[in-house]
Image: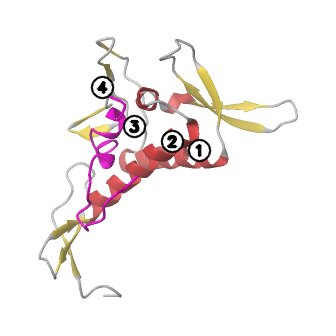
Amino acid sequence: MGAGSADAELRVSSRDQRHNRPPVRAINRTTGELVHLSRDENYAFWQWAIVETLRLAGLRAEELTELTHLSVRRYRWTNGEVVALLVISPSKSDRERVVPMSAELFHVIAQVIRHHRNEHGTVPVCVRYDPHEKVRSKPLPYLFQNFHGAPSVACPSSPSGATSGGPATNSLSRPRTSTGLRQVP
């Protein structure tokens, strides 16, 4: 098998019902614990994407949950240079903001879009419920979605709400992965 194969044995179980591909799991031979590698990799991806998007764009949690595929725009300067822009929906100030994306932020957003396309063929359309205004949005291709049955967007009810919810958001609320790693701020 390879380096580290003494501690884990790979077994492929029945197909993942959402994506019709087998999840990757391993059994830790020392502890006998089943390690869900596919799930943990997915959680780690969303954790990275959420933290980096919040950090690089300077967003609030509610603004993160309102980002859609339509929020990504491009602007062409008169000299022909193209700049990627992130359009932030009105929230706290009731004014739309436009954030020029750095190369790092563009990379993160591109990876989120690529992740959706690899999993679903496109960024899935879903409805977002706003707990403050108590209304549902029009169906839109939200970038940060939960996938428990039908796609939905996590709506933060607290400052940490955007980082507690489903695959796209539960990742930060998971204090430990099945491999025993612990995230510390």
Residue at the image point whose x is 88% and y is 35% from the top: 79
Which tag, 4 or 1, sits closer to the chain's start?
1
Mark identifier at residue 105: 1
Question: Dot 2, crowdedness within 10 Å: few (<14), some or many (≥20)?
Answer: some
Front residue of 24/183: it is: 183
Q: Quadrant of residue 159?
A: top left
Residue at the image point whose x is 47% and y is 30% from the top: 60
Which tag, 1 or 3, sits closer to the chain's start?
1
| Vertical comparison of 113 with 69: above or below | below
Of helix, strand and loop, which one carries label 4? Answer: loop
The residue pinned by badge 2 equals 53
Query: Whole-percent x and y of residue 165?
Result: 27, 38
Question: Dot 3, crowdedness within 10 Å: few (<14), some or many (≥20)?
Answer: many
Mark identifier at residue 157: 4
Magenta region: which residues?
Answer: 158-185
Please state which amino acid type lies under the numbered disc 1: Leu
Of helix, strand and loop, which one carries label 1? Answer: helix
The residue pinned by badge 3 equals 144
Residue 49 is inside the magenta segment: no
Between marks 3 and 2 in the image, the one whose residue lies nearer the viewer: 2
Callout 3–callout 2 Cβ contact below 8 Å: yes
Which tag, 4 or 3, sits closer to the chain's start?
3
